Amino acid sequence: MRNYILIAVAAVCSLISVSCSDMLDIPQKGVLDYNTYYQTDDQILSADVAMYLEVRGWEYNVKLCKAMLTDDFWAGGSMRGDNNNLEHLNEFTFDAEEDYVQSMFTTFYTLIYKANVILGHVDENISPMARMARAEAKVFRAFAYFDLKTMWGNPPLVDHELAPSEYNVPNGSDEDLWSLMEKDLTEAISSGALVEKKGVNDTETWRVTKQFAQALLGKVYLWQGKYAEAAQQFDAVVSSGKYQLFSDYSGIFRSENKHNCETLFESNRVHDDNDSFQNFSMYALMTNWRMDKMNWPSDTPIMNTGWGFRVPTKSLYDDFVKDEGVDGYRLNESLKTLDQLNSELGITLKSPIIGEGYFMWKLRILASERGMGNDFVYAANTIWMRYAEVLLCGAEAHMMAGNTGKATEYVNMIRSRAKLPAKGSVTLDDIKLEKRLELFGEGTRFQDLLRWGEGSRMSGNGKVYPLLQVNGQVQYVDCGNPTNGFKEGKYDRLPYPATEIRLNSEITQNPGY
């Protein structure tokens, strides 16, 4: 993984924007002159595609890291100590040297840099392609800053390419960071340059859409407590009529259903067994079941390789049962128990594994989605936002704005697809529960818990770990450190990478690190 951070990115990238020395008139080869390069649609497209590729690369670090920082998963693996970095995240014992946190921080600023290149060098008057690239750059910049702001608190605000004299960037203020996101998204939405789906049956539109920008702006408002403004943005997505809930809950994530009626934005993979690089997914192997500790029939539909680093908790399962019972449709399309794996697929354990007897089903990795002869090739797209999240965020915004009726309507749309009875009225706790169940494993819960002030749900993380025996019994093993777990005042913000602190004299580290 890449371990350079904000300053390193800026320093390296600045080399390609420096013109030839005045003392030499020998043209440099292989170096772009940004003052003259972005003049054609092909050149602009190359910069635009670079943003999409950067987001696709988030899957491994961002998705996996966010999953570990919740009460939904155990770190898993072959046994405790298999991946110390993931355990540090899951048990809240990480510090500013943590590789996963540093990699997330880096990739967010890399996307911001790529967006700033477009916004600094592409003239919107060149062509419609130029106008679209600039609008998309604003959306992507806000997308990155949303995660930075909601997980780090006050990260440096970088709204242009940095000159060497600007490398020491101080922490941004709440007002400036939120204002930049609001401005970028509002301008992109009103530009008329973002594409829109033709309708709910459009599976061809893959670019960032106006509705994705509206939903992201809704989240920006929601996190600030601007509930009426947030509700208005989520309502705009709903009233567009371009999205609806996909009928088959677990089918949303399958490779044959890419860009379905529910997904607002996803990263593309083209299933090509001859081009492993384009479909490379370490994430798929990291998160698939720990198959070397299982007995599985040859006709099992699940990919037969996996390292098991995303193990659902009993807490998550119990919340499903609380809402819909053990036979609930959404539960059984989301999680499987060890008994179900045995009765439905003929799978048994051949040695103990970390876990409490629950296995991811919603985001399972199918054998049919594995590249021929290559476990690192995976065909399914990565979904970054879907319509269900719009409805649940919209429900919360309406609830907090005093419109319980609309909040109930949106929650009942989710419950209808989950084959659950409608509620006559919902509470904020109802919305929180539905959001946990509907979106688990999709990278939203950690930021939700921080916003709700409920990080204490992870205070027990790392005190013990579960060992699932072959006979289905669970043994809880003492981790030997009673101080493990989430701590208010520290882990409600992630640490700025130690390398960033060493190189950037203007940034102030978050408390506790």
Image (cartoon, grey):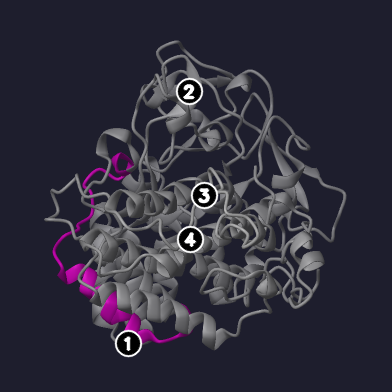
Residue at mark 3: 58
Residue 228 image label: 1
**x, y percent for residue 286:** 58, 35
Marks 2 and 1 close (CB-CB < 8 Å): no
Q: CA distance from mark 4 to mark 1?
A: 21 Å
Q: Earlier in the sequence, mark 2 or mark 1?
A: 1
* Above or below for 410 versus 287: below
Q: Is the stretch drawn in magenta largely helix, strand or loop? A: helix
Q: Of the residues shown, which amino acid type is indicated by label 4?
A: Thr
Residue at mark 4: 444
**x, y percent for residue 479:** 82, 47
Q: Of the residues shown, which amino acid type is indicated by label 3?
A: Trp
Q: Earlier in the sequence, mark 2 or mark 4?
A: 2
Measuring 21% from the left and 62% from the top, which residue is drawn there?
Answer: 128
The quarter of the picture where the N terminus appears is top right
- Label 2 crowd bin: few (<14), some (14–19), many (20+), radius 10 Å: some
Residue at mark 2: 342
Q: CA distance from mark 2 to mark 1?
A: 49 Å
Measuring 63% from the left and 38% from the top, which residue is drawn there?
Answer: 355
Question: From which residue to which does the magenta span run?
Answer: 223-252
